[in-house]
């Protein structure tokens, strides 16, 4: 079989099952192409994409501006490594740091790499600036977090599937309950060796858990009072997904293209990924001000592909699309409609317990146990009805369409969701 031969869905699934590691459990649909909010399978059936590659494709599939920037750069210069300068990286760093309000950017490739980078940065700052004795720095994290699956990150995960049989684990992390200010306060006050607090503004993989109003601002204030760095992991929540450029912004809905509203929280270290490239290329970044980032010296950290010309060009285009097409405002407005419609539906359908989220990062809680197959079965039926979504934690279905979706399309998708769930009642 030639590489370019067209496969049926059955053939594609069989190939992956035979020749690939079984580290995912995909919904049985084989996507062959995508455009905007739509994807098509190998048999050319059309679907609404309501997962957006876990929010990597916020700007829609194959956005022409992003693809054009990527292709043009690929035809000019793809990679130099950081052994030399290239003529695109500095432009990207200036654009992104000005957009997000930081002095410096450290470019990486994947979200997990960026989290690892932030952890290293925080520890080095703790030893060289804060004055914690070497090898004693600890980082506070939250229960039910998801920051990736590297050995270090799973060391502070409480997901048994991610952790079991991968030890020994990395030390230096303290887990507290998410959205619990008292637990954070107690830990900060009782331990002088805290370097940083790493937190997701919304816990996406855990089921789109939105913290209490004011939680992030209060947590940042506590961290500042104890000279502890506040690290915001916005790999999934950033780049307009929650109805603002960053989830840690305050009441701004990004009507201004530069999201000039007063931030509720200004992270000391900001972690970005996924939609930073519009899903077209692996791009992630860690941003911080000079007082933190300047502890990184040549040889301390790096990546052959981090900051490569294709990544830099693609990221600039992806961020421009977010501003030019007012994607944060669209996410804010359509997210309000989605939650209102599903909340009303939940009043009349016993299978839906609740809906929660911000912007176009939402989830519905199915009225069944985590061990049940109900949410999976609903997603299978949604697939049959032309909409792709996936369960998380057994009885939660996450809904996160590309932010280029319009109101007419959204209402059609809401109808599909209602119709499908009603069939299970």
Image (spheres, grey):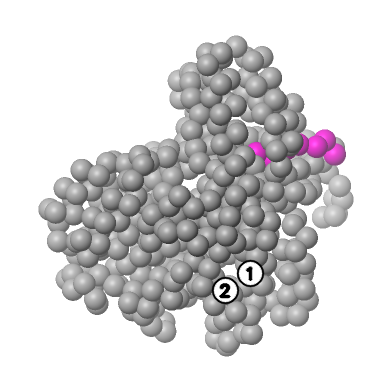
- Residue sitting nearer the eye, 217 or 267: 217
Mark 1 neighbour density, 10 Å: few (under 14) some (14–19) many (20 or more): many
Residue receiving disc 2:
95
In the displayed structure, would residue 103 be above or below residue 411? below
- Residue sitting nearer the eye, 157 or 414: 414
Q: Which residues are magenta?
A: 44-51
**Numbered tag placed on residue 7 in the rendering:** none
Q: Position of residue 140 (x, y in %)?
A: 27, 53
The residue at 49%/37% (across/down) is 357
Contact? badges 1 and 2 (CB < 8 Å): yes
The residue at 74%/40% (across/down) is 30
Q: Which quarter of the image is occupied by the C terminus? A: top right
Q: Is residue 329 left or right of residue 143?
A: right
Instruction: Answer with the quarter of the image where residue 12 lies.
Output: top right
Q: Position of residue 142 (x, y in %)?
A: 32, 46
View extreme (left): residue = 190
Please check the rendered image and state whether residue 47 is part of the magenta-colored stretch, yes or no: yes
Please check the rendered image and state whether residue 82 is part of the magenta-colored stretch, yes or no: no
Q: Is residue 212 left or right of residue 321?
A: left
Q: Is residue 153 left or right of residue 355?
A: left
In the displayed structure, would residue 32 be above or below residue 317? above
Residue receiving disc 1:
316
- The answer, for residue 149, to whether it is visible in the render is no
- The residue tagged with tag 2: helix, strand or loop? helix
């Amino acid at each position: 079989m030639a590489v370019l031969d067209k496969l049926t869905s059955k053939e594609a699934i069989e190939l992956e099952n035979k020749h690939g590691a079984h580290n995912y459990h995909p919904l049985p649909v084989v996507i062959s192409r995508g455009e905007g909010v739509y994807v098509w399978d190998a048999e050319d059936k059309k679907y609404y994409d309501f997962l957006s590659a876990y929010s990597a494709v916020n700007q829609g599939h194959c956005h022409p501006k992003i693809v054009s920037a990527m292709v043009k750069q690929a035809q000019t210069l793809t990679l130099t490594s950081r052994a030399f300068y290239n003529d695109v990286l500095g432009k990207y760093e200036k654009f992104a740091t000005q957009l997000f309000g930081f002095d410096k950017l450290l470019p990486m490739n994947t979200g997990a790499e960026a989290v690892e980078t932030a952890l290293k940065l925080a520890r080095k700052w703790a030893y060289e600036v804060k004055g914690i004795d070497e090898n004693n720095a600890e980082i506070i994290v939250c229960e039910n977090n998801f920051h990736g699956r590297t050995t270090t990150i799973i060391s502070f995960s409480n997901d048994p599937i991610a952790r079991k049989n991968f030890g020994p684990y990395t030390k230096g992390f303290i887990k507290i309950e998410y959205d619990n200010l008292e637990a954070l306060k107690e830990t900060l006050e009782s331990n002088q060796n805290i370097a940083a607090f790493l937190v997701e503004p919304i816990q996406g993989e855990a089921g789109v858990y939105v913290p209490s109003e004011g939680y992030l601002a209060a947590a940042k204030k506590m961290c500042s009072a104890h000279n502890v760095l506040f690290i915001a992991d916005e790999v999934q929540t950033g780049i307009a997904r929650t109805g603002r450029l960053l989830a840690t912004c305050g009441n701004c809905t990004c009507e201004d293209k530069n999201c000039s509203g007063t931030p509720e929280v200004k992270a000391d270290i900001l972690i970005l990924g996924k939609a930073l490239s519009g899903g077209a290329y692996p791009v992630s970044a860690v941003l911080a001000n000079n007082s933190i980032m300047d502890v990184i010296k040549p040889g301390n950290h790096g990546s052959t592909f981090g900051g490569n010309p294709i990544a830099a060009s693609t990221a600039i285009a992806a961020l421009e699309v977010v501003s030019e097409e007012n994607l944060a405002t669209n996410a804010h407005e359509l997210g309000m409609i989605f939650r209102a419609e599903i909340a009303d539906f939940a009043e009349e359908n016993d299978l839906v317990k609740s809906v929660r989220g911000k912007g176009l990062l939402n989830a519905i809680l199915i009225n069944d146990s985590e061990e049940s197959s109900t949410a999976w079965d609903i997603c299978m039926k949604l697939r049959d009805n032309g909409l792709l979504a996936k369960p998380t934690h057994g009885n939660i279905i996450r809904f996160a369409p590309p932010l280029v979706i319009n109101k007419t399309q959204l209402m059609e998708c809401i109808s599909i969701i209602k119709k499908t769930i009603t069939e299970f009642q």
